[in-house]
Image: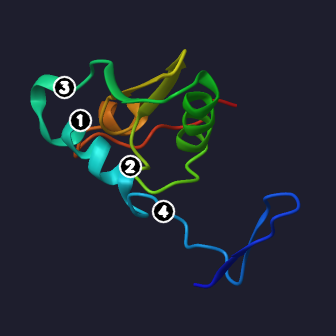
Amino acid sequence: MARKATQAAAIEVVDELPKRQYNGEYIWVERLKPLTTQKRLFNRWCLIHTYDDPVGAESAQKNLTQRRVKFPLPNHDWTFAARGPELYAIFRGPHRAARSRTKNSPPATRRK
């Protein structure tokens, strides 16, 4: 990639925008997988990442809550919380309705 610096204002001109650098599309899968596989972490709040500022933690919390990023078992019961620059998660397994239903129990009926 060729770079040219103009001396007048010290602005750098580039021919191409550099590729975005991040840890990969599945970074949340890697960070959250232990919560789904280690029994000692099940149903407990865990610090999953610390950002430089609270804005980063709040942004990640919103994206995870709204399922805008990929992470393990997205249809299960997850809760995410940002406290300052820290991001926390808790994994509770399948949603409560699915957990309470057993294999032989009839499906829930609506009341009229």
Q: Measure how far apart labels 2 and 3 are at the Cα level.
A: 16 Å
Judged left or right of residue 43, residue 54 is: right
Q: Which residue is mark 4?
A: 21
Q: Which residue is mark 3?
A: 41
Q: Residues within 10 Å of mark 2 (few under 14, many from 20)?
A: some
- Image vertical order of residue 62 relative to residue 19, above or below: above
Q: Which mark is residue 28?
A: 2
- Image vertical order of residue 73 relative to residue 106, above or below: below
Residue at 41%, 35% in the rendered image: 77
Amino acid found under the numbered disc labelled 1: Leu
Position of the C terminus by quadrant:
top right
Residue at 55%, 66% in the rendered image: 20
Judged left or right of residue 16, residue 82 is: left
Which badge, 3 or 1, comes first in the chain's sequence?
1
Which badge, 2 or 3, comes first in the chain's sequence?
2
Q: Measure how far apart labels 2 and 4 are at the Cα level.
A: 15 Å
Which badge, 4 or 3, comes first in the chain's sequence?
4
Residue situated furthest top in the rendering: 83
Which badge, 2 or 1, comes first in the chain's sequence?
2
Judged left or right of residue 83, residue 103 is: left
Residue situated furthest right in the rendering: 8
Q: Say which of marks 4 and 3 sits in front.
A: 4
Which badge, 2 or 4, comes first in the chain's sequence?
4
Residue at 32%, 18% in the rendered image: 45
Amino acid found under the numbered disc labelled 2: Trp
Q: Which residue is mark 1?
A: 35
> Dividing the picture into quarters, in which one does residue 78 lie?
top left
Amino acid found under the numbered disc labelled 4: Gln
Q: Residues within 10 Å of mark 1 (few under 14, many from 20)?
A: many
Answer whether labels 3 and 1 touch (C-beta < 8 Å).
yes
Q: Position of residue 51 (x, y in %)?
A: 48, 30
